[in-house]
Amino acid sequence: MEIKILGTGCPKCRALEANAREALAELGLEAAVTKVTDINRFVDYDVMTTPALVIDEEVVAAGRVATKEEIKEWLSGRK
């Protein structure tokens, strides 16, 4: 499983990353978590507002900080 955080490194981006890592830990899952900070790459995902969360190349949230509980739901469906 691969998780990408799209954003410029702002506090909201860091909060989204923290929520994703906590969700993974609570579910006992392992995944590669990477940050994509190159604005030109955001277009590859059709993301115009950040932060955005991408799980296995699917954008599941954009323009807001997804909660840990939301992320856990999305991850549970991919076990």
Image (cartoon, rainbow, N blue to C red):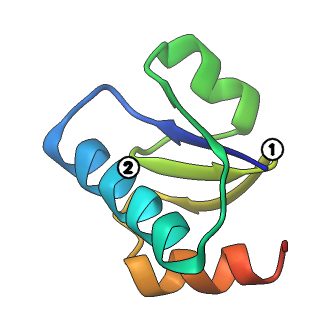
Image position, residue 33 (x, y; %): 56, 39
> In the rendering, at what x and y percent does residue 66 appear?
42, 71
Tell me which numbered mark, 1 or 2, is placed earlier along the sequence. 2
Which quadrant does the C terminus fall into?
A: bottom right
What element does badge 2 sit on? Answer: helix
Disc 1 or disc 2, which is closer to the eye?
2
Circle 2 sits on which residue? 17
- Residue 18, relative to residue 66: is it above or below? above
Quarter of the rendering containing residue 47: top right
* Observer-nearest of 1 and 50: 1
Left or right position of 77 against 60 = right
Name the side, left or right, on which 18 lies relative to 5. Answer: left
Q: Are marks 1 and 2 in contact (CB under 8 Å)?
A: no
Question: As shown in the figure, which amino acid type bears the numbered disc 1?
Answer: Glu
Compared to 52, does 10 lie above or below? above
Q: Nearer the viewer, residue 79 or 61?
A: 79
Most extreme residue toward the left, as rendered? 11
Quarter of the view holding residue 29: bottom right
Left or right, 49 with respect to 13, comes to right
- Amino acid marked by disc 2: Glu
Within-10-Å neighbours for mark 1: few <14, some 14–19, many 20+: few
Image x and y of residue 60, in percent: 66, 64
Q: CA distance from mark 1 to mark 2?
A: 16 Å
Q: Please state which of residues 4 and 10 is positioned toward the viewer in this rendering.
A: 4
Where's residue 68, x and y in %? 40, 77
Q: Which residue is mark 1?
A: 57
Q: Residue at horizontal 65%, vertical 49%? A: 54
Callout 1 secondary element: loop
Q: Is residue 53 above or below residue 43?
A: below
What residue appears at the point 49 percent right and 13 percent down from the top-left corner?
38
Q: Residues within 10 Å of mark 2 (few under 14, many from 20)?
A: many
Please tell me which residue is depicted at 70% across the width and 39% down the height of the picture: 46
